[in-house]
Amino acid sequence: MKRGLYILILFLGVFAACDKNDNFVVFSVENDVQLGAQVKAEIEKDPSMTILSPSVYPEVYTFLNHVRDGILNSGEIAYKDEFAWEIQVIDDDSTLNAFATPGGYIYVYTGLIKYLDNADDLAGVMGHEMAHADLRHTVRNLQKTYGVAALLSIALGRDPNALAQIAAQVAGQLAGLKFSREYETEADEHSVEYLAKTEYACNGAAFFFIKLTEAEQGGRPPEFLSTHPNPENRVTNINAKAESLQCVTSLATNTGYEEIKASLKNDR
Ligand SMILES: [Zn+2]
């Protein structure tokens, strides 16, 4: 066996066995956050993306942070303390979408917030996106695309430019990023597990997909559905998961969602 390969295997065995979710991931948790922060910087440089300022729309961020904190405190998030879990609202009323970067930077479009009917729908999609980050789906995809050796070399800091290049590439694709069916199902089901321990209906993600299907039928194709196909199967699967967990499926009350939607209508 070549010496280099032997050292690589030894390294992987010692340092990169399995992560908290029992997946084999070469990147360290710090690498995920580093990559996410670089993607965030790329998004900030993009003139087509306007982020709502938290100082101008404090109540919107307080609301979204409250939903996020409920999910984080569910006890189901493996990287609750390690990831950033930072929310940014993209000022774009015509887009029905949300996405998350590695390391837990979450992006929600104003178009989606305004379109949804209640906090449970929004909590469902946030749970889904937080699951993609917590289960490290993007980084695991990169590992498949670039191979373990290339990612290991970045993880070891041997190739500082490569991380920046990957960040630029991830930033360009994120809103249109398509995961495998396996990862999507995993994210849907985790959303139910998270929400089961919050004030929101645990099948909020099902309400969300039903609502998006209505938008599609109304001639307004939601971006989220282009990367998240088969909404009908998802609704069935999400509701089956809720049934198996025996969790609460009635809508949360007094969430203040209507007020948040109304407050977004005012230009400031
Ligand atoms: Zn997804």
Image (cartoon, grey):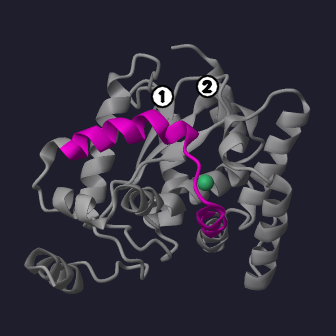
Cα separation between marks 2 and 1: 8 Å
Would you say residue 185 sits in the magenta stretch? Answer: yes
What is the quadrant of the N terminus in the image?
bottom left
Q: Amino acid at mark 2?
A: Leu
Label 1 sits on residue: 57
Q: Is mark 1 within 8 Å of ligand 1?
A: no
Please give the label number shown on residue 164. none
Check disc 2 and report the residue beneath it: 264
Residue shown at the point (42%, 48%) measured from the top left: 101
Viewer-nearest residue: 46 or 68: 46
Residue at 33% x, 54% y: name it: 84
Residue 265 place in picture, x, y as percent: 65, 20
Query: Image quarter for residue 120?
Result: bottom right
Q: Which residues are magenta?
A: 162-187
Return the disc, 2 or 1, that comes first in the chain's sequence: 1
Q: Is residue 254 visible?
A: no
Q: Quadrant of ligand 1?
A: bottom right
**How many residues crowd mark 1 within 10 Å: few (<14), some (14–19), many (20+)?**
some
Residue found farthest to the front = 1
Residue beneath the point at 24% across and 65% down: 149
Q: Position of residue 184 (x, y in %)?
A: 63, 61
- Does the magenta-highlighted stretch encompass residue 175? yes
